[in-house]
Image (cartoon, rainbow, N blue to C red):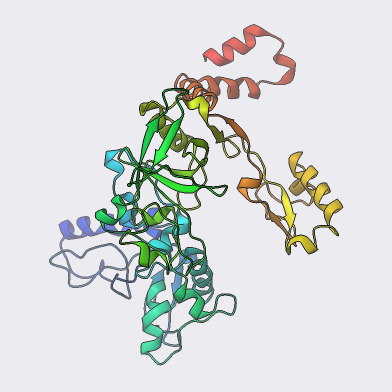
């Protein structure tokens, strides 16, 4: 309608690219809902020209458009384009990347960091799926979750799986004060006898993590660590009990995202020390940051820069080597004995890569009913830190010189032609 209004050819020429650009896939991807974002019936990013009094219509694929009527909660006329949760990560997750902190918060934690109350992300995702099933009322997730429905006389959403009191009380501590974050900083002392690293806290005392270990964050060449708190209301045994965050931490969970409020970091994981504070193990385990090879390499380089002999501690490589976690029955020890034989059979099938194929499912299909994956700490694949560093360094060199690309080319050659070296070399060189 706007395009058909009387206007000059030059004005139409400026308006047409906007209409055409709206048909791209990128234009169909919507931002993650934010509680502070204003509600608008038309969230499209196009800004009207000065001589146009309203935003032109956006021609999008009907599959991505959902019409809303007054019968919907908080409805209204017009079309709403739902673009999914992966749209635009919260701005806070990008802070610090210019200084070499490239590990961003995983998208499953975006709802948690976007929530002004920082409620536990797993619980929020349950409500988010229910919001999608309802047809995205109010167009903004947090408006539907907290305020708009109640303002119009509708009760707040309450799911039986996660009751509303549990949702509101189960929160994650997000530290935004640099002074409080600095209280979790750790230092490293090298033992000249064997080159092992001794981790000390702010008071100069050796850190003894116990069997569970401490979660750590590496950011701006500083190591931060604390005990992980997974049950709200429990008292965290942090390195500095007099820390200003201590009282808040007693009422909230404490995860990897807590140290810097969801900002980008260089590396994340878990470290273990003995009673003398000597570093014995390092696990690249973090559900919020999902560490990979690059994160592990940065952590090892950090310890090496501080003079720590990498061969004095072990590193878990199950994620790098794609070690599949075994299955265990849901329900604890009571069901373990009755399903022991079936559990062994399932684990054997998984190790051979035949479990999901036998049932006609995909590679990443969920585990069978009444079964769950074991903890990462129960399926460790430990290697010496020095060996891991050399492995990652050689792999980076081979990627740089295209060795893996050449291997993939050779694998595409028919088996009957692989016996000829000249054929193989010609394919690789081309």
Residue at the spot 67% in from the left edge and 51% down from the top edge: 374
The front one of 359 and 379 is: 379
Q: Position of residue 319 (x, y in %)?
A: 58, 40
The front one of 139 and 119 is: 119
Residue at the spot 66% in from the left edge and 20% down from the top edge: 413
Q: Position of residue 145 (x, y in %)?
A: 43, 77
Q: Position of residue 52 (x, y in %)?
A: 17, 68
Instruction: Describe residue 36's horizontal placement relative to residue 367 as left or right.
Output: left
Instruction: Describe residue 88's horizontal placement relative to residue 53 as left or right.
Output: right
Instruction: Describe residue 359's horizontal placement relative to residue 91 as left or right.
Output: right
Does residue 30 appear in the picture of this structure? Answer: no
Does residue 370 appear in the picture of this structure? Answer: yes
Q: Position of residue 412 (x, y in %)?
A: 64, 24
Q: How many marks?
A: 0
**Compared to 351, does 118 lie above or below?**
below
- Point out the residue furthest to the bottom here: 153
**Compared to 258, does 356 lie above or below?**
above
Question: On the rendered image, what quadrant is the N terminus found in?
Answer: bottom left
Residue 22 occupies quadrant: bottom left
- Point out the residue furthest to the top here: 422
- Point out the residue furthest to the left here: 50
Residue 67 occupies quadrant: bottom left
Residue at the spot 36% in from the left edge and 67% down from the top edge: 247
The front one of 29 and 160 is: 160
**Compared to 236, does 309 lie above or below?**
above
């Amino acid at each position: 309608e706007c395009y058909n209004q009387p206007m000059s050819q030059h004005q139409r020429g400026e308006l047409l690219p906007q209409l055409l650009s709206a048909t791209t896939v990128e234009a169909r991807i919507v931002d993650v809902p934010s509680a502070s974002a204003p509600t608008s019936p038309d969230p499209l990013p196009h800004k009207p020209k000065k001589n146009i009094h309203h935003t032109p219509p956006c021609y999008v694929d009907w599959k991505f458009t959902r019409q809303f009527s007054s019968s919907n909660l908080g409805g209204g006329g017009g079309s709403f384009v739902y673009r999914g949760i992966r749209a635009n990560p919260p701005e806070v997750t990008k802070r610090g990347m210019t200084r070499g902190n490239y590990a961003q918060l995983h998208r499953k934690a975006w709802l948690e960091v976007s929530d002004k109350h920082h409620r536990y992300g797993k619980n929020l995702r349950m409500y988010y799926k229910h919001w999608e099933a309802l047809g995205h009322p109010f167009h903004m997730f947090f408006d539907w979750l907290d305020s708009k429905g109640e303002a119009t006389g509708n009760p707040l959403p309450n799911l039986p799986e996660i009751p509303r009191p549990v949702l509101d009380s189960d929160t994650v501590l997000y530290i935004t004060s640099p002074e409080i974050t600095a209280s979790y900083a750790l230092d490293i002392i090298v033992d000249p006898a064997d080159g092992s690293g001794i981790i000390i806290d702010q008071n100069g005392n050796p850190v003894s993590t116990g069997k569970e270990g401490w979660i750590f964050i590496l950011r701006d060449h500083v190591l931060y660590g604390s005990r992980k708190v997974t049950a709200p209301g429990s008292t965290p045994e942090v390195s500095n009990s007099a820390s200003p965050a201590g009282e808040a931490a007693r009422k909230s969970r404490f995860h990897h995202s807590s140290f810097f409020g969801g900002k980008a970091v260089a590396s994340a994981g878990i470290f273990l020390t003995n009673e003398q504070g000597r570093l014995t193990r390092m696990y690249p385990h973090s559900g919020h940051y999902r560490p990979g090879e690059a994160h592990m390499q940065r952590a090892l380089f950090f310890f090496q820069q501080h003079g720590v002999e990498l061969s004095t501690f072990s590193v878990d490589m199950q994620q790098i080597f794609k070690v599949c976690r075994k299955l265990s029955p849901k329900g604890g020890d009571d069901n373990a004995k009755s399903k022991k034989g079936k559990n062994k059979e399932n684990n054997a099938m998984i190790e051979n890569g035949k479990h999901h194929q036998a049932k006609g499912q995909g590679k990443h299909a969920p585990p069978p009913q009444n079964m769950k994956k074991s903890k990462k700490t129960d399926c460790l694949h430990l290697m010496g830190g020095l060996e891991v560093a050399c492995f990652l360094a050689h792999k980076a060199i081979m990627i740089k010189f295209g060795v893996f690309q050449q291997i993939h080319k050779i694998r595409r050659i028919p088996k009957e032609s692989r016996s000829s070296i000249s054929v193989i070399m010609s394919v690789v060189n081309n």
